[in-house]
Image (tube, helix red, strand yellow):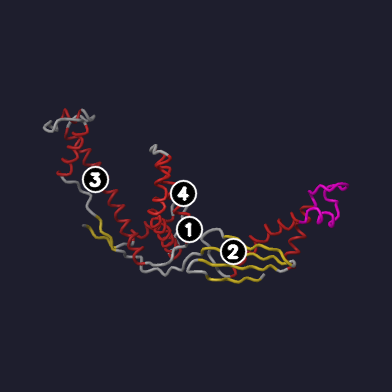
Amino acid sequence: MKLEVKKIDATKRELKFEIPPERVSQALEEVYKEIGKVAKVQGFRPGKAPRQIIQKEHGNLAQEEVIKKLIPEVYEEGLKQHNISPMDYPQINDVSLKDGRLFFTAVLDIKPEIKLQEYKGIKVQRKSSQVTDEEINKTLEIFKKGKGEAQDAPLDDNFAKGLGYPTIVEFTTFLKRQMEMDKDRQNRIDVENQILETLLKENSFAVPASAAKKQLEHLVQENIRHLKSRRVPEEEIKKREEGLYKNLKPVAERDIKLFLILEKIAELENITIGEKESLPQKVIEFLLKNAQWQEE
């Protein structure tokens, strides 16, 4: 097998394959044997028709099957031979069978070479999850407005009973606990985002176009499903579609870049996952454990 690898850009490669006649011939022989077992040729029982008749009647089919058989095989061999890590399935072009040789071209995006900056000890700042009396009072006022009560209506036990609690003290205690849990959850997300933003800022590399395109399509379709669930008219969705592609393109590129960084960290740290685990989440947990924590 001859293979020529051409660098198109930082993440795109063109692989030109030439498969020699002896391998094509061997594959063709195997295919004809398989066709001969099932081919219906007038005057002969299945499996008993002469090769030349099968070749005459099923030659085109045999060539198609040889192409289907050989292309995936030699493509995988080529990747291993040149240590190429593809991001997605290749685009196969220029397939031809001439003079007993099989030629084809594969165009594919590869994983970029990532030289990671230091990722252990990232500085993060976690905000306090404590809830102030002022925040509680503001939330109580929101509840009061939600029930349509007058501005000067007292926040007393009767008010609490209307919400299913025997006293205003018990309701306020419950409310404070819920608000602290919400703050704690938001603070956790905030700390994770600090980690991710640092990784993005400190690691620069080209994002494979095909992976970014696939992620963009996923995000757009997700948004369209959301719009449909809100019963937005089909015409309105069509109007918004172009804008979605434009606005979500940088988001898709960011998603792929982050995934590749986290995947690289997992590789360097030998982080593996179980059947129901998420690799990015497990890597983020590792980074949080090794971060430099600062309380606000």
Q: Earlier in the sequence, mark 3 or mark 1?
A: 3
Which mark, by number, is residue 180?
3
Q: Earlier in the sequence, mark 4 or mark 1?
A: 1
Q: Earlier in the sequence, mark 1 or mark 2?
A: 2
Instruction: Determine crowd level at label 1: few under 14, some 14-19, many 20+ residues with C-alpha closer than 10 A.
Output: many
Which mark, by number, is residue 276?
4
Q: Nearer the viewer, residue 186 or 14?
A: 14
Disc 3 versus disc 1: distance between alpha carbons? 39 Å
- Lateral position of residue 72 relative to residue 296, left or right: right
> Mark 1 and mark 4 in contact (Cβ < 8 Å)?
no
Res 165 quadrant in image:
top left
Total labels drawn: 4
Q: Residue sitting at 67 percent across and 68 percent down? A: 18
Q: Amino acid at mark 1?
A: Ala
Question: What residue sits right under mark 2 in the picture?
Answer: 106
Say which element carries label 3.
helix
Q: Amino acid at mark 3?
A: Glu
Q: Earlier in the sequence, mark 3 or mark 4?
A: 3
Say which element carries label 4.
loop
The reply to whether the magenta stretch includes residue 48 is yes
Q: Nearer the viewer, residue 266 or 46?
A: 46
Question: What residue sits right under mark 1 in the picture?
Answer: 211
Check the picture and name the quadrant holding the C terminus.
Answer: bottom left
